[in-house]
Image (tube, coloured by chain):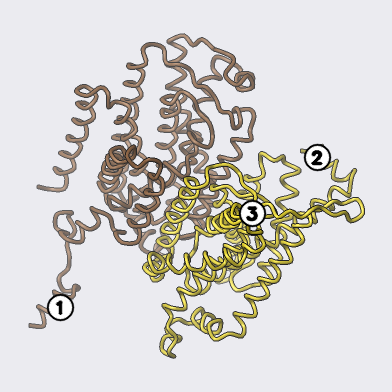
Amino acid sequence: MLDNISILFQAPIFAVDLLVQGLLIGGIFVLAAYGLALVWGVMNVKNLAQGDMVILGGYVAYQCTLWGIHPILALPIAFVVLFVLGWGVYAAIIRRVVDRDMFTSLLATFGLSLLIQQALNLRFGPEVKIAEAGFGTFDIGELSIPAIRFVGLGLAAILAICIVLFMRNSRMGQAIRATSQDPRAARVLGINTDQVYAFTYALNAAICGAAGVLVAMIWNIQPFYGLVHSIRAFIIVTAAGLGNLPGVIVAGFGLGVWENYSGFIFGAEFAVAAVVGLLVVVLMVRLFQMYRLRQVVR
Amino acid sequence: MSAQKLDLSLYGVLVAAGILVPLLAPAFTSQMAILWLMVLMAVTWDMTGGQMGYNSLGNIAFFGIGMYASAVVQIGIVYDVAEYTAAFGAIKVDFTVEQYWTGLLLGIGFGGVVATVFALIIGPFMLGLRGPYFAIGTLGLAVAVAELVSGWSYVGGGSGISMPVFPGEAASGSQVFYVLLFVLAILAHVVIRAIYKTRFGLAINAIRDDEDKAEAMGIHTTRYKVTAWMVPAFFMGMAGAVFGNMSGFIEPLEVAFPTATFGIFMVAMALLGGKGTVWGPVLGAILFHIVKEVTWTHLLGWQWVALGAIIIINIVYFQQGILGWAQDRWPSLFGVTVDEKTTRTGQAEAAK
């Protein structure tokens, strides 16, 4: 471990490389985390199937490459497919857990996550898959970076901007924000909150699907990787707080950088442990903040 | 029939089944051993999940920690553990019968103690989290512990440890582990049922109903919560130690910390039977295990998808579980008295 840290100091270009790669990956984490924050904030549902929807989107891209469609063109396809699927999931399951306590939604979506990952495992097998986009690498100074990572970050940024504009300006976006502020008042004022919830959940699934296409292009997918993606999204949202879009973006990039550095310093076998351990750390930090709040009240 | 007598007769049925089934149908011995393991898991999960309202998704961590602690002790009393695991099973250590039994009993005790100490250390931090945060935090904890163990070369990392071989015939070995799991499961249920009858049981129920109010009433909630989490940890640790010996080979992701199988089974079983009831988790575990064993092999790979569907249906449409539903339907059978004045039908009759 100390050897690896000293390598970083001896070869600073290596450290810069890890930083850049981490930032490029982080953009995708932001997408999934934004979707989670949306569902969490609007309908008070904690979606543990978040990561599995990401992986599902990745498999849509993989299937498209098998049919000879370029993975970038698969992005809108995955968006639409996951939107429809998300609407269906809402109608079948989520509608019945929106008003219940949060553990109900958590466990129901955990069951959904098991269902998705096992179905993917049956359909595609447990091997690690990549949706090959066919871009080369290019060099900046001594750094050599796969071009697809930049393309991925660019696509993620475009998608994020579109979603933010949609939430700001469209009627549906306004209805979603109104419902998240006060569902009862929104209902009184003639907003069909059930439809708003359905749309929000479907939109979240679609965002996850698009993020999954990017993951499949620049990284890799496997049926059981979903849980770690869910945990990443939870880390980001918990660290940033709800309704804090700049915070989500900063935390997402930070998580990408942390993952690359920790994977290098502790070794690849501790990569997942470093992410999941960070979840526990973030929850603890939030807990101590709460303790301080309670002491002030006393 | 009073509740006391009913409980005693149910214990009688369980003990009779536990003794008779392996005698009459020896082929089912290992099946039944797994059943007792599942009963233990569901009952201990229900102590925090049902009675205290802290729904843990990571109790499986105690199971794996107990398993690894016992493995280290059992091998450690005879041989150097680091050397043994570094050879990936190439070293065959001959255990004398005496060494095996001392190792096994020490290992089970040690597994329970280490898991309890782990709960004591981690408890004050994790149990400060409320509701869904606790569930996600414990899930993360279980995954993190599993990943850390699979990267730790002292205990064999991802390639695992071969456990000492049982001295004697394989059939008598499986009987020994059956008896151990059976005794542990019954013991866990008796102990936990006894705890529910004390002030401690009332305190954790108060925490479930309204934690802030309980704290305001002078209950030292953190102390109660940590103690209540240490009981499941103790039993899960011991069960893990026995199960590790039963499977003969332990490895972090599938055997010791199976978050997606046993880790979620125990929640599903407790919910199916009715969480927060004394016998619900037992009933849920028995039903779940029977259904699983009968249908699993016919589903041709779709069983895991079916498991996800079962959990969803259970939690969304039938959350109170079988005994929870029965308790709502016939409260007097469960020793629950309903004040008619407060119910809607009672008010309607009073108005007449």
**Amino acid type of the residue that numbered disc 2 sits on in the rendered structure:** Asn
Which chain appears yellow? A
Q: Which residue lies under the disc numbered 3? A: A216
- Residue at the location (83% across, 51% down)? A17
- Residue at the location (80% across, 40% down)? A4
Query: What is the C-alpha distance between the residues marked 3 and 2?
Result: 29 Å
Q: Does the image show residue A284?
A: no
Do the residues bearing badges 1 and 2 touch, measured as CB atoms within 8 Å? no
The chain ID associated with circle 2 is: A
Q: Residues within 10 Å of mark 2 (few under 14, many from 20)?
A: few
Q: Which quarter of the figure is the N terminus of chain A placed in? A: top right
For numbered disc 1, what is the local secondary structure?
helix
Question: In which quarter of the view is residue B10 placed?
Answer: top left
Q: Which residue lies under the disc numbered 2? A: A4
Do the residues bearing badges 3 and 2 touch, measured as CB atoms within 8 Å? no
Question: Quick one: A166 or B44, which is closer to the camera?
Answer: A166
Q: Indicate whether A28 appears above or below B343.
A: above
Query: What is the C-alpha distance between the residues marked 3 and 1?
Result: 61 Å
- Residue at the location (64% across, 77% down)? A164
**Amino acid type of the residue that numbered disc 3 sits on in the rendered structure:** Ala
Q: Which residue lies under the disc numbered 1? A: B347
Q: Does the image show residue B280?
A: yes
Tint of chain B: brown
